[in-house]
Image (cartoon, grey):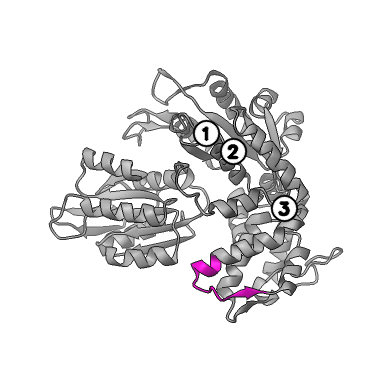
Amino acid sequence: MKRLAVAHPNNVYFYSLIPIQMNISSPSGHLLILDDDEHILLTTRILLKRLFLSVDILASPKELAAKLSTASYDVVLLDMNFLPGNTTGEEGLALLRQIKITQPEARIILMTAYGDISLAVKAMKIGATDFIVKPWANHDLLSSVEAARRVDTTPNNQPESRLNMKSRTMLIKGNSPTMEDLWRVIEKVAPTDANVLIMGENGTGKELVAREIHNLSGRSEAPFVHVDLGAVAAALFEAELFGHEKGAFTDARELRQGPFEQAAGGTLFLDEIGNLPLALQSKLLTVLQSRKVTRLGSNRQLEVNFRLICATNSPLGDLVKGRQFRDDLYFRINTVELTIPPLRERGDDIPALVRQFLDRYTTQYNKTSLRIGNEVIRSIMAYEWPGNIRELQHVIERAVIMCDGERITNADLRLPVQNNSTTGTNSLNLEMLEREAIRKALLTHGGNLTQAALELGLGRTTLYRKMEKYGL
C-alpha cells in the first residue's frame, strides 16, 4: 500500500493513496481545497480529482478573495486553523462566512484536527455542509464530498447556484410561445403540493424548472433536495435514499439521514427516475404511498413530509407499456406532467440566451469588452443543439476562453458543419465522427442516454464523459 506521511503538531497522519472502490458518478463541478499543509493538499487533490472537472488548491487564506473573484466552486474543502498554535476554529468560521457571502451556492466541508461538537454546530448554522476530523479515512472523505456534490440543499433564500434570478427566468420563461405556455402551467401548479413529473431531453433545464416550482411554493423556505437516481447503485439504494443507522454496515460509522428526511417540509427532486431498475421501483413506491421511511439497520418507521418532483428524459409511457416501469408508480408521480421543449423548438429564445451566457462568462474570465456579431448569432440559430441549453452554455464559455480578439467568430464556436443528408460524414477526423455519432444517437432516442449508450456500444458513464468532452 502506498502511503504518504503528513506531519502535524501532535502526531503524524498517514493518508493512503490506494484506490478506493465506491459508487462515484462521472466527474462534474469544480472543487477548491484550502489548507496550509502542502501534503494534505497533494494527497487530497489526488484522491478527489476523479470526482471533479477541476480541482484548485490554496495554501494560504490570503489568496482566497482573489481566487473567489476569478472562479466559482461547487464544493470547498476548508481547513479550520491556519495560525500556529491556534486551535479554536475561529479562522475557519470567518473564512466560511467569507465564502458564503461571495459564493453562497458552494457546499463547504470543514476540516480540522481538533474535533469539537459545538464548533461543528456553529459551522452548520453559518452554512457548512459537513464537518470532518483529521485524520480521516479516505472512504469517509470520499463519501462526504460525493454527498455534497450530488445532494444540493441550498436554502432558497440564498442566490441560486450557477444562475441568478434574471438568467433563471430567461431559461424557464423565455419569449417563445411554447415556453410561455409552460410558464403558465408552472404558475398554477407551484402553489399546490401536487406531485409533478418533468419530461424533456438532457440539457433542457428540468432541474431549473423543479427549482422554480419550489421557489413559487409555500415550501420555499425549506430545503430543496436533489437526488440523481441514475447515480445510485442498486446495492446502495436503501442506504442512499432512506439513510442508515450507525453500524448498519461495515462503513456506517455514524447515523445518516436520507434525502427523504433531509427534505423535511421542503421539496424532494428525484432526477433520472426513468433509470430506476424495476426491482427498486416498488421500494420507492412504498415510501411515496406511506410517507414513511425506515433507515437501514433500524426497525422504526419515520414519518416524512415533502413535496415530490420527478424528472426524466425517458419516455415513461412507453416504458410502462413495455413493463419496464411500474404503472402504479407512474400514476403516483405524475399528478401534473410538464414537458420542456428542446432548444431547437425555442428559436425565439436563443439570441437572448446567447447574450445572457456571454455576459456571464465575459465577466467571469475578465473579458468584458468581448462582443459577438450577428453573423455568429445566425450560425448559432442554424445549429440543431442536440445537447440543448447545456450545450449552448458550454459552447459560449469555450468561445469566450478561446477568443483572442474583441469579437467572437464562428471559428471560436467550433460548431460542426451540418448537412441534412450527410451531416458530418465527409470528415475523416475521428473526434468529429465520434461527436456526430453521439449527436445522432441522442437525436434518434430523444435524449434518452440509456438507449443512446446501447446503440453506441458505450457505458452510460463513458457516454456522459464523451458528451462533456464534445459539449453535448
| Residue lying at 27% horizontally and 39% vertically, measured from the top left | 121
- Tell me if residue 319 comes above or below residue 202 in the rendering: above
Cα–Cα gap, marks 2 and 3: 19 Å
**From this viewpoint, which residue is outermost toward the bottom?**
405
Q: Residues within 10 Å of mark 1 (few under 14, many from 20)?
A: many
Residue 369 within the magenta-colored segment of the rendering: yes
Q: Magenta segment, which residues?
A: 361-372
Which residue is at the front of the view, 34 or 248? 34
* Disc marking residue 267: 1
What amino acid type is highlighted by mark number 2? Ile
| Residue at (53% x, 53% y) in the render | 164
Quadrant hosting residue 472? bottom right
Q: Residues within 10 Å of mark 2 (few under 14, many from 20)?
A: many
- The mark that comes first in sequence, 3 or 1, is 3
Task: Identify residue type, mark 1.
Answer: Thr
For the residues bearing labels 1 and 2, Cβ distance under 8 angstroms: yes
Instruction: Give the CA separation, mark 3 to mark 1.
Output: 28 Å
Image position of 66 with respect to 405: above or below: above
Q: Nearer the viewer, residue 87 or 315?
A: 87
* Whole-number angstrom distance, CA of label 1 to CA of label 2: 9 Å
Task: Give the residue number, with chain letter if any, for mark 2.
Answer: 213
* The quadrant where residue 278 appears: top right
SS category of the residue bearing label 3: loop
Q: Earlier in the sequence, mark 1 or mark 2?
A: 2
Q: Position of residue 159 (x, y in %)?
A: 47, 49
Q: Nearer the viewer, mark 1 or mark 2?
A: 2
Work out whether 471 lies above or below 407. above
Residue that badge 3 annotates: 175
Give the class, few, some or many, for how many residues have Cα within 10 Å of label 3's Cα (few <14, many ≥20). Answer: some
